């Protein structure tokens, strides 16, 4: 799968359609939102390259930014913290009241006291706590937990013979695995899964963030009183001496920044495996592996597609493009990976050269566990349901809107029904289906309690 278009005609909505040259129109900014954007971001990147290494864009109505599309310029921004700060308290439009308080970009751009938004010594302190704690993870334990969660989730839908792999599998898998890694007790774990699900789906997001904030505060208090063998306890005992507020914001980023791209990485890799002949022969021997599908997604459809937001500390000239101090500079990991100046052999020879995990001091500290979990989760699913196939044409699938991440809305599949391993718990509600649980419906008590009970039975 390659989302990158070669053509450079203007994307829909651009005034160049009316005969003008938008690259010459000072005020025009290409919108990175809306249906056309979601349907074909590759066409937008191809068009934006006409501006040079970086182009004027709008992240949401009334939110201007510059998008870096060239690989070398992207590396320059990511690796030069003395010119480019991550601290969004430098964001001039926001400070001067030009950003609407309900702008949809604020949850991703507004300052929080965690590693994402910190520079220099403060960043080192916050990041070291994260990297040291993640380094203590036992890969065998993580693999075992993925196996358990995968078996539990497949057991919830295997008798149906159909599923939406996002709603029924990838969305819940990473959250349930994280609940174990972060040592969540049943009640806090249930609220975290429900809160993050609401937040990512944009349905009742406000209620979702309240649930998350309460559950994280409870988790931190619980682990301060009763430390365990988990990432939350290791963060708390780290010499960085994180305050309760810092702990909550670190956990919010770790779980939030982790679960959303993970679900997209797994789902897009599954789409490739189920639709591309080089892969789906693979289950029956010979063809490409899950690892190859993951690499293909990281190169061609990076789950975090445009982020690495930086604020120039002074007016900066980026290879001829003027970047004013305090104006957001967004790195397009997707466009940089598709930079035509990278030879195609680079993709085959150097699998690590893509920017899907970013680069420089803020590169993702969790790429190893993220890949381990994704590969194991896909392998387990394919082992459980060996004749799984897409139940709709690839051309009918749609992608979530928004400038920052790239992920499918749904991934409907069918397979020969498989008998449940464990009996079905009591129906969750009156609207439950014949199998006792509505597709995607929350089990009574919550997902985490249900998973723990299922595994203990
Ligand atoms: C498919 C999965 C993932 C992808 C594609 C991904 C990608 C990225 C990218 C591109 C960045 C840089 C963002 C920026 O510069 O603004 C980043 C940073 C980060 N990621 Fe990931 N990530 C993934 C999974 C995870 C997981 C599982 C965790 C935690 C358990 C995690 C924790 C973080 C943290 C804490 C940062 C901030 C690091 C810093 O600012 O120093 N990520 N990730």
Image (cartoon, rainbow, N blue to C red):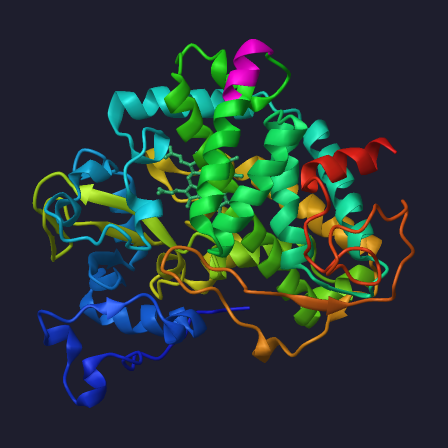
Give the residue at x 82% y 38%: 454
Give the residue at x 31% y 52%: 105
Of residues 423 and 34, the one drawn nearer to the viewer in this rendering: 423
**Residue 436 in picture, x, y percent from top left:** 82, 56
Q: Which residues are magenta?
A: 220-226
Does 244 appear above or below 321? Answer: above
Of residues 287 and 399, the one drawn nearer to the viewer in this rendering: 399
Asked if one can make out residue 351 in the rendered structure from this viewpoint, the answer is no
Does 187 appear above or below 162? Answer: above
Give the residue at x 21% y 54%: 100
Side (left or right) of 377 relative to 249 = right
Side (left or right) of 220 relative to 170 = left
Q: Residue furthest front?
A: 430
Q: Residue furthest bottom?
A: 19
**Residue 245 in picture, x, y percent from top left:** 38, 23
Of residues 200 and 210, the one drawn nearer to the viewer in this rendering: 210
Magenta residue check for 221? yes
**Residue 278 in picture, x, y percent from top left:** 68, 68
Image quarter (top left, top right, bottom left or bottom right) of the C terminus: top right
Side (left or right) of 445 relative to 196 = right
Side (left or right) of 212 relative to 375 = left
Quarter of the displayed picture in which ligand 1 can be seen: top left
Q: Number of labelled discs?
A: 0
Magenta residue check for 116? no
Asked if one can make out residue 200 in the rendered structure from this viewpoint, the answer is yes
**Residue 419 in picture, x, y percent from top left:** 92, 56
């Amino acid at each position: 799968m390659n989302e990158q278009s070669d053509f450079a005609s203007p994307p829909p909505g651009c005034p160049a359609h009316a005969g003008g040259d938008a690259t010459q129109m000072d005020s025009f900014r290409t919108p990175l939102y809306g249906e056309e954007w979601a349907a074909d971001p590759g066409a937008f990147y191809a068009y934006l390259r006409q501006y040079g290494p970086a182009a004027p864009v709008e992240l949401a109505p009334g939110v201007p930014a510059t998008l870096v599309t060239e690989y070398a310029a992207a590396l320059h921004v990511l690796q030069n913290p003395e010119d480019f700060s991550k601290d969004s308290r430098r964001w001039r439009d926001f400070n001067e009241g030009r950003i609407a308080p309900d702008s949809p970009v604020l949850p991703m751009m507004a300052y929080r006291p965690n590693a994402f938004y910190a520079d220099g010594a403060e960043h080192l302190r916050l990041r070291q706590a994260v990297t040291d704690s993640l380094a203590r993870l036992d890969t065998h334990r993580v693999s075992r937990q993925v196996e358990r969660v995968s078996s539990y989730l497949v057991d919830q839908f295997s008798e149906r013979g159909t599923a939406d792999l996002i709603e029924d599998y990838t969305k819940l898998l990473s959250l349930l695995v994280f609940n174990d890694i972060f040592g969540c007790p049943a009640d806090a774990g249930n609220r975290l899964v429900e809160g993050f699900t609401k937040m990512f789906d944009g349905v009742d997001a406000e209620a979702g963030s309240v649930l998350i904030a309460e559950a994280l505060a409870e988790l931190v208090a619980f682990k301060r009183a009763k430390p365990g063998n988990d990432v939350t306890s290791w963060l708390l005992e780290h010499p960085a001496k994180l305050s309760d507020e810092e702990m909550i914001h670190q956990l919010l980023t770790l779980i939030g920044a982790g679960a959303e791209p993970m679900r997209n990485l797994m789902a897009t890799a599954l789409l490739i495996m189920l639709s591309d002949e080089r892969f789906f022969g693979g289950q029956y021997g010979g063809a490409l592996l899950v690892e190859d599908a993951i690499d293909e997604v990281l190169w061609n459809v990076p789950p975090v597609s445009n982020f690495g937001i930086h604020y120039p500390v002074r007016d900066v000239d980026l290879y001829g493009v003027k970047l004013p101090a305090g104006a957001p500079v967004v790195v397009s990991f997707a466009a940089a990976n598709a930079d035509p100046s990278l030879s195609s052999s680079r993709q085959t020879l150097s699998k690590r050269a893509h920017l899907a995990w970013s680069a420089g001091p803020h590169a993702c500290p969790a790429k190893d566990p993220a890949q381990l979990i994704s590969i194991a989760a896909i392998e387990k699913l394919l082992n459980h349901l060996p004749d799984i196939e897409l139940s709709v044409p690839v051309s009918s699938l749609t992608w979530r809107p928004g400038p920052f991440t790239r992920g499918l809305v749904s991934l409907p599949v069918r397979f020969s029904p498989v008998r449940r391993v464990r009996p079905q718990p009591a129906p969750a509600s009156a609207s439950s289906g014949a199998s006792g649980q509505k597709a995607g419906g929350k089990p009574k008590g919550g997902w985490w309690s249900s998973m723990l009970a299922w595994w203990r039975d």
